[in-house]
Image (spheres, grey):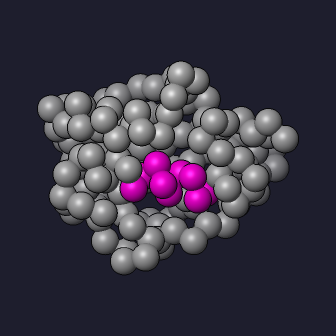
Amino acid sequence: MPKETIQSELFEPIGPYNHAVMAGGQIFISGTPGIDPKTGQLAGKDAYLQTKQVLVNFQSILASVGASLDDIAHIQVNLINVSDFVEMNRAYSEFFSNSYPARTVIGIAALPKPGALLTMNAIAIPKN
């Protein structure tokens, strides 16, 4: 199945991967920490601000191919501290309404970006 790299104006990937690819009519977004692309730094030191930035980054990726958060079918959240679940949900609910995507939340031990409290990855199915 051919795949197409989705170009975005995000930060430089931390390793040998793309932020997102399109294949089989679906968009696969890589694990994304809450890095502000303007500064290259984490958007804040708490899960609320980092979650907001991840979802803004998702919006940017999706908009570059004419899609939106409404096209996301599934999100996986990887939290270093499961006690951040409430703050992650608070930010998350600001971006999604009644048409929530399916979601998996997993507690993990560490992330490659120092200071990152979470990452999210997603699968979107654009309507167009």
Q: Position of residue 25 (x, y in %)?
A: 79, 40
Residue 63 at what x, y percent from top left?
A: 67, 56
Q: Is residue 107 visible?
A: no
Specify the quadrant of the image occupied by residue 99: top right
Given the current orientation, which residue lies at the most extreme bottom position? 39
Residue drawn at point x = 70 percent, y = 60 percent: 64
**3 on left or right of 48:** right
- Tell me what residue is drawn at x 46 percent, y 49 percent: 55
Tell me where the magenta segment starts and ends, as one range. Answer: 53-61
Q: Nearer the viewer, residue 49 or 79?
A: 49
Magenta includes 41?
Answer: no
Task: Specify the quadrant of the image occupied by residue 112.
Answer: bottom left
Q: Nearer the viewer, residue 54 or 14?
A: 54
The residue lying furthest to the right in this view is 128
Q: Quadrant of the N terminus?
A: top right
Quarter of the figure with the C terminus: top right
List x then y, in percent, for residue 80.
21, 41
Residue 97 visible, this angle: yes
13 relative to 128 in the view: left or right: left
Q: Is residue 15 above or below residue 99?
A: below
SS assignment for the magenta stretch, majority:
helix
Query: For the point 39% across and 56% down, which residue is it?
Result: 53
Q: How many marks?
A: 0
